[in-house]
Amino acid sequence: MIALLLAAAVPSTAVNAERAFARDAQALGQWTAFAKWADRDAVMFTPQAVWARDFLKGRKNPPQSVRWWPERAISSCDGHTTVTAGPWRIPSSNATGGFTTVWQLDKQNWRWVYDAGDQSYKSGKPPARIRSERASCRGKAPGAPVPPPPALTAKQANSTPADYGRGNSADKTLGWDWKVKPDGTRLFRTYLWNGTRYRLVLNQTVAPQK
């Protein structure tokens, strides 16, 4: 019975996890919600890359949380890895922008491993439908969708993320990578397996926020 109750509490999809994350931000506080849903090795940007666990530790919630909602979802064939994207806004200041999050399903729940915001949206409302795209389950994905970065030293791996990173779904049908330039410009790409090759489906270049 306990196992069934725990299973029922886990969102069925990354989109539902994103929505639950957004609700928690309003109910629990912005940074409390970020910490609740973050993977241990999750990465955020300030604009340089930082470990979320370090950035969020002891951070006080703002008086009003940002509000956001997903409008696009890009998923692996097995459905266990999804990139979500959409707009955000802060009602009190009329500030708006966009976000991109990478979600992975572990043995217990959905966790975000990458979260980044930008100023790409000037306004927006929750969409009537989510734009969804899923990797093909045909054929056999040959390996990692994006080339691996140079190896990190033990000190780099245990202290702070470098200025680049990559990841892929367990079934190798979805991959992503990111890079932050010295001036804070952030690059992010997502690749999907289409049954015969990997296809670039999301390619972001985000200027440093002013």
Image (cartoon, rainbow, N blue to C red):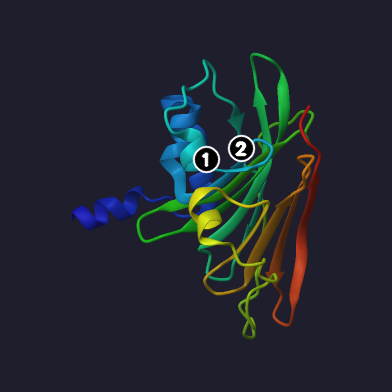
Q: Residue at x 46, y 25 (%)?
A: 29
Q: Identify residue type, mark 2.
A: Trp
Residue 156, image x and y in percent?
A: 55, 55
Considering the image in quadrants, where does the C terminus appear? Answer: top right
Q: Residue at x 71, y 75 (%)?
A: 194
Q: Identify residue type, mark 1.
A: Arg
The disc placed on residue 19 is: 1
Residue 160, image x and y in percent?
A: 55, 48
In the image, residue 72 above or below residue 148: above
Q: Toward the viewer: 128 or 93?
A: 93
Residue 45, image x and y in percent?
A: 64, 40
Instruction: Tell which circle, 2 or 1, labels the residue nearer the N-terminal end.
Output: 1
Q: Are marks 2 and 1 in contact (CB under 8 Å)?
A: yes
Horizontal side of 184 relative to 126 (left or right) equals right
The disc placed on residue 187 is: none
Q: Which residue corresponds to mark 2? A: 69
